[in-house]
Amino acid sequence: MNEVSSLYKIRDSALSSGRAVYNTSQLAHLINKDRNVAAVYLSRLVQKKLAIRLIRGKISFVEDDFVIASQLVEPSYISLDSALLFHNVIQQVPRYIQSVTPVNSITYHELGLEYHKINPGLMFGFERHKVSGSYCFVATREKALLDGYYLKLFTLDDVLELGRTSEYKKLRPLFLKFIGKGKKKMLEVFQ
């Protein structure tokens, strides 16, 4: 088998797994080779335009921003304005795809991705969606509001206004589910 057909086989195998974003270790596991061999394949996949390089050591086989955002930093899920746009609650497209993660906040300006650190106790209220032959994780409308209020990106007025377009009754159980620092402040919404 020649190199090009091997690269196509790797790409097809990766996509059939449902996952679209791979780091060197994940690719090594997929092709059952060591990390050094996988690193070479990673570079060659990009050279042959069968994948796109996201950051050093990470590639994607699809160009869908939501898929990339969900799989580049793990664990994470799309939230805030990006999730509200996904659910048609707002119409304005945010500058960056906004995600939340229990690990450190980071912005990838060149990719248009922004990750906000949240308390691990807030890692709930998101759903898996099939997109571009892969998947992404997106907060429910209500959870996107909770995350925005927790991160002080949404005011209480924002939550109440946007909550009207959502099902306001679903907000309270989410706020009560949160365990951690700041719970008292979070419950101000329902006073």
Image (cartoon, rainbow, N blue to C red):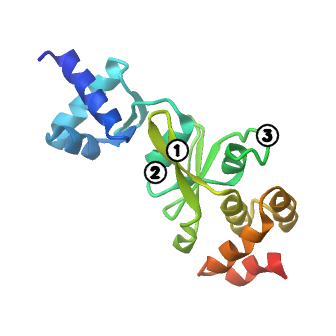
Q: Are marks 2 and 1 in contact (CB under 8 Å)?
A: yes
Residue 170 screen position, x and y as percent: 72, 68
Which residue type carries mark 2?
Val
**Residue drawn 81% across and 63% down?**
159
Helix, strand or loop under label 2: loop
- The vertical placement of 13 against 142, above or below, is above
Q: Residues within 10 Å of mark 1 (few under 14, many from 20)?
A: many
Q: Residues within 10 Å of mark 3 (few under 14, many from 20)?
A: few
Which residue type carries mark 1?
Ala
Residue 127 screen position, x and y as percent: 55, 55
The residues bearing labels 2 and 3 have C-alpha atoms spaced at a distance of 25 Å
How many discs appear?
3
Q: Can you identify the residue that label 3 sits on? A: 92
Residue 54 placement, left or right of 86: left
Residue 136 screen position, x and y as percent: 51, 46
Q: Can the viewer see residue 182? A: no
Residue 6 placement, left or right of 21: left
- The front one of 146 and 104 is 146
**Residue drawn 21% across and 45% down?**
29
Q: Earlier in the sequence, mark 2 or mark 3?
A: 2
Q: Are marks 2 and 3 in contact (CB under 8 Å)?
A: no
- The front one of 103 and 7 is 7
**Residue drawn 51% across and 60% down?**
104
Q: Can you identify the residue that label 1 sits on? A: 69
**Quarter of the image containing the C terminus?**
bottom right
Would you identify the image quadrant in which residue 143 lies? bottom right
Q: Can you identify the residue that label 2 sits on? A: 73
